[in-house]
Amino acid sequence: MEEAAGNAVLEVGKCLAAPIGRQFMYLYNYKSNFDNLEKEIGKLKDARDEVKDKVVAAENNVEKIKQQVKDWQRKVDSIIDEAEQLIQEKTNSRCFNLITCYKNSRKASKKVEAVTEFLQEKETFSEVSLPTTREDIRLRLTNKDYEEFESRLSTLNGVLNAVEDAEAGIIGVYGMGGIGKTTLVKEVGQQAKKKQLLDEVIFVEVSDKPDTKKIQDELANQLSLKFETEAERASKLYARLKTDKKILVILDKIWEELNLEALAIPCGNDRGGCKVLLTARDLNVLQSMDSVKNFQVGFLTEEEAWSLFKKMAVDVVDQTIIKRDYLPNDVCKECRGLPIVITTIARALRNKRLRSQWKDALRELKMPSPTKFAGILEKDYSKIALSYSDELKRTFFVCSLMVNNTTISDLFKYIMGLDILEGVILTMEQARDRLESLVCELKDSNMRQRVGVRGVVRPEVAKCC
């Protein structure tokens, strides 16, 4: 019995010896514990600064910082402050108190362990940020970019309904250059996201010389998609767009048929949640790309044109000397309801406060080939002129000289008399068929208001020929 009791006491003594020994070591290692703490805190500061530099670089690149990294930074700042305060207390302490030394040494030892864990966690940060989908700045319209005109409202709603329609994979918007197609589709993207019809909107300007690689790079950039090799470019982009997410890809300013499959844009029955919205001046281009729903953007009404003109020209239109003889109204009418012309001319005249300047501008606008605004409008219309054949340009120019009551037969006489038709034409029937084909092409290209026996051609467009 006594032997058993002795063994029990011995075992208890062994159990107590280890903890008591550890407590004693805190006193014994007092100096080394603080030396280790200062050394490890130095390492942690270096690690903190390194992570901070990466975070700043990621934020400057408009990337989203991982929450784990944010939490790590916050905790590291806290433990560094606590450790420095503890080290400062040790430095300032002049009296030797065993209890105080024991407590501080123990705290220093525990903080060294914590610092070691933070340093190990930092090594797991291969990246401090998450890939983010960046919204194209061109989609962020301001009030001056979009005017909610009554004549455009039905078109806007029609395109929005088509975007919401699960069966409509490819949607088209067409109209002549400068009519406002780009502005309208940007507003469609904005409203669709606001109404949560879409998860993502991607905007790419194609231009008259489409570059497949450039278009794919633009898509990938907005989708935060990276390619390890060129070989995986198309497959990875296709897979990203084909997800269940509702993605609208806006391809703006299309001048000729594009192969969407070659661009790695899913457009068939297995397109997933991807939709494509195209803008072109020619309806034939949209139809060649199998656009199932196409919407035409027309000219502004006289009231809408005047409203836009006043907004762009600001208060100069209310100047008494300018208002005399209705000069601003006449200048606005010469813009013929084209938003880009209205905006450009109004801004060019907004600081012109002499009546003579406005009269001169009106005279220039009425000329067949205005020189005063040639430089201003050249950028917007040079490509339109280059995109037509000489045969079509000449036909259009003759149309622009016709009065409102001109018949197709009258036009035919002029076309034949001026020997405008090209190619081998053997009969009068063939010539008439060719002329009607050209007139239809003008209509589909939005270079005529209406086609048929009678029609009105916007005179300012004829200047492009």
Image: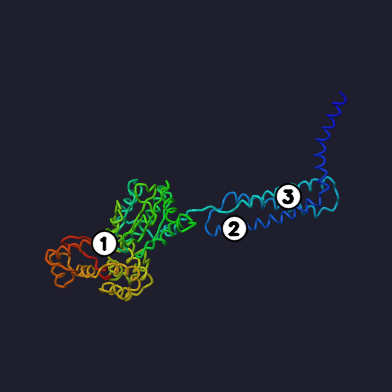
- Eye-nearest disc, 1 or 2: 2
On residue 179, which mark appears?
Answer: none
**Label 3, residues with CA under 10 Å away: few <14, some 14-19, many ≥20:** many
Left-right relation of 152 to 405: right
Left-right relation of 456 to 159: left
What's under tag 2, amino acid-wise?
Lys
Which quadrant of the figure has residue 317?
Answer: bottom left
Instruction: Tell me the quarter of the image containing the N terminus.
Output: top right
Residue 295 on image: x %, y %: 29, 54
Which quadrant of the figure has residue 6?
Answer: top right
Colouring used for the render: rainbow
Q: Identify the residue under disc 3.
A: 112
Instruction: Tell me the quarter of the image containing the C terminus.
Output: bottom left
Q: Secondary structure at mark 3?
A: helix
Most foreground residue, 103 or 415? 415
* CA distance for labels 3 and 1: 76 Å
Between discs 3 and 1, the one toward the N terminus: 3
**Label 2, residues with CA under 10 Å away: few <14, some 14-19, many ≥20:** some
* CA distance for labels 1 and 2: 52 Å
On residue 54, which mark appears?
Answer: 2
What's under tag 1, amino acid-wise?
Asn
Residue 154 on image: x %, y %: 30, 52
Between discs 2 and 3, the one toward the N terminus: 2
* CA distance for labels 2 and 3: 25 Å
Q: Secondary structure at mark 1?
A: loop
Q: Compared to 55, does 14 lie above or below?
A: above
Residue 61 on image: x %, y %: 53, 59
**Which residue appears at 67% of the width and 58% of the height?**
46
Between discs 1 and 2, the one toward the N terminus: 2
Q: Identify the residue under disc 1.
A: 446
**Which residue appears at 13% of the width and 67% of the height?**
426
